[in-house]
Amino acid sequence: MTGQAVLGAGATAYGRSGGRPRELARAAIELALEDAGLSGADVDAAYCSYSLTGLITGQESMLGQLALEEAGIVGIPITRVENACSSGSSALREASLAIRAGACRRVLVFGVEVMSTVRTEVALRALAGAGDVDEEAPLGMTFPGHFAMIAQRHEVEFGTTPEQRASVAVKNHAHAALNPKAQHRHPVTVEQVLASPLVADPLRLLDCCPISDGAAAVVLGTDADRGRGDVRLLACELATGSYDDERPLTRFDATAVAAGLAYEHSGLGPDDISLWEMHDCFTIAEIVHTEDLGLCVKGDGGPYVASGATRLHGPKPVNVSGGLTAKGHPIGATGVGQVVELTTQLRGEAGDRQVEGARAGLAHCMGGFLHGDCGSTTISILARA
Amino acid sequence: MTGQAVLGAGATAYGRSGGRPRELARAAIELALEDAGLSGADVDAAYCSYSLTGLITGQESMLGQLALEEAGIVGIPITRVENACSSGSSALREASLAIRAGACRRVLVFGVEVMSTVRTEVALRALAGAGDVDEEAPLGMTFPGHFAMIAQRHEVEFGTTPEQRASVAVKNHAHAALNPKAQHRHPVTVEQVLASPLVADPLRLLDCCPISDGAAAVVLGTDADRGRGDVRLLACELATGSYDDERPLTRFDATAVAAGLAYEHSGLGPDDISLWEMHDCFTIAEIVHTEDLGLCVKGDGGPYVASGATRLHGPKPVNVSGGLTAKGHPIGATGVGQVVELTTQLRGEAGDRQVEGARAGLAHCMGGFLHGDCGSTTISILARA
């Protein structure tokens, strides 16, 4: 049996619940264990991800230990992994490597973030800590600024329109309306997106993912294990940007590098993938990723999404969970939550948002943004055995 | 050949240099690569550790990427590992697992912290983020408070004296005086320690490690590699506390658990170890660790260190680098720096502080403190092949 077994998966609702990070994490841990039919005594290691909690609450370290203790789990090795918005998927990767190395057999991976308990300016300042705070943030090059530049460049090079970008938000909100755990469960129209306040020209409020609280967890087993629905993690790869000044702003090489590795290691190709979860921190991001992941050729991402091809019942469903845009983006939880969504889909348990006949799914996460390029990109491929 | 090869090792001086974390990290990276006779193009992955940088500078994420870019290294997978004061050793463990899993062959592990650039109160508040900021820090249970309780309990149970605790500081300052890269290179006397200001009764200023800046790096290779001096990483283990209310305050079970695993996996026993680097964040900590690691029986740590047994030329040399107390404790760098020291010693290149005939060394790191117990303890064993 190829690939490690996803034994259990669970996530809290994403939203603005507030609360203590350790309690939110505990809720996700308990859901994942219950889903796996396991108790805390059955896992022999844990990896935890969070990113902004230190800046938001002062609890820089040990949140994983506190969450495990809340869940009654003590004495197992636990390691925090932090790679900005790809923290959760990077934690999954470390868990996968630890199992492959023979250091453990059943690993709990969980991610959490609580961002709504502070003023939005404080959360935004914390988010800027995933960029270069010395040299870029003081110039206004925070995340909306970076992606606004990408959107402007994509307009100039390929003629991508505001309406095409808006169609990403429309699609993902429509998907989120079918996801009981999504943050923004109301459909939106192209007109509503275009009428929402300008954040960083040309990106508007509904082009941007929200401030979110949430937690997600999975239990990963060995190649020899077999979880309910027999969902396997076939590959989990990490790549970083080149920070090459000559690189076009409209392409993320790290996405292609990580995807190439993930296809190679999984033995699957793009045509085998039934659904994609992509890092749509902004609508333009999903358009770029759709191109970089090969769903369409470079430059065609705008018309492609506007055509409906990436809708739930289209040929290439993207972000059927609602994505970061509408499901929400609790930073440390996001990468783990994508895997929870793929597991649910591959088991055929996604209800109204089920991708029919889903056999394999790809999760793509991007963390950090430096010098016009991403700092950390992960790609995971999961499939039914 | 058993054990992964330490191909290169290097560290900056520890002290209050200030400066930008990325530049300090770059200096350590360059020293380690130069020591290994490698260039940045020769490493295929990196693990980075820091803990307080987010709280101190706002740069919560991507410091590893920024440091690598400073060193001219781009495009390799990089992951930040954070486990409070054991962040560096936890990063080493992830690197070791990644190599064992076959994901990479030559991995750069580096740790960094800059703590002196903010007011001491700010640094202390950041340090409190390695405890429970919701439930314990507001009661005054920060690190000096926790270890003061341990010291008081050790006095009551075993009759440990202030003079015996002071002898740890005296020994480690004497060692640091022989280490050109140590922070506190001046010898101190028992009288000076006892006359230093009270921090948390009964711990005095010279019982405590200082606020430090510094960076350290190692290049880890596969079992098949062979670095200069042929130093091998035989084991790198992680354990967490039990948070058991019934547990005596004067013992850290996680130290014994991690050490047991490290001895088992290395095939070495305590009698094979030529020198120990231990997590002497406070003098009482070294006394407790000396007992928990089996250098003497429980309760005898005070008289044992006062006897001189753990001095440089004693039978069981402990913290010949100067330890956290006198070499310094730049949080994210500490665990990596311990391995740099062991590598230097095992190669026979430690100059005035050389442990004669050193064949094997053990590094012990403790991260976080919750509910009277440690959150994360690592033990690494290195040896000459």
Image (spheres, coloured by chain):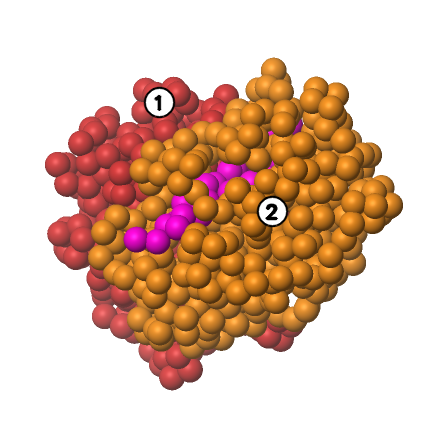
Chain colours: A orange, B red
Q: Residue A244 location, x and y as percent?
A: 57, 20
User: A237 and B325: which one is in front?
Assistant: A237
Chain containing mark 2: A
Q: Amino acid at mark 1?
A: Asp
Would residue A372 be visible to someone looking at this image? yes
- Whether residue B94 is in magenta: the answer is no
Q: Residue at x 44, y 25 (%)?
A: B30
Q: Residue B211 location, x and y as percent?
A: 56, 49
The quarter of the picture where the C terminus of chain B appears is top left
Q: Nearer the viewer, mark 2 or mark 1?
A: 2
Q: Identify the magenta region.
A: A359-385
Q: Circle 1 — which element?
A: helix
User: A203 and B124: which one is in front?
Assistant: A203
Q: Residue at x 87, y 45 (%)?
A: A195
What is the chief secondary structure element of the magenta stretch? strand
Q: Amino acid at mark 2?
A: Arg
Which mark is drawn over residue B42? Answer: 1
Q: Residue B331 location, x and y as percent?
A: 50, 49
Locate residue A288 relative to residue B96 in the image: left or right.
right
The quarter of the picture where the N terminus of chain B appears is top left
- Mark 2 is surrounded, within 10 Å at the Cα level, by few (under 14), some (14 to 19) or many (20 or more) other residues, namely many
Q: Residue B95 location, x and y as percent?
A: 35, 42
Chain containing mark 1: B
Report the residue marked by disc 2: A311
Which mark is drawn over residue B58? Answer: none
Would residue B341 be visible to someone looking at this image? no
Locate residue A206 relative to residue B198 in the image: left or right.
right
Q: Residue at x 46, y 73 (%)?
A: A30
**Measured Cα–Cα span from mark 2 to mark 1:** 44 Å
Q: Circle 2 — which element?
A: loop
Locate residue B327 relative to residue B297 in the image: left or right.
right
Above-or-below relation of A173 to A73:
above
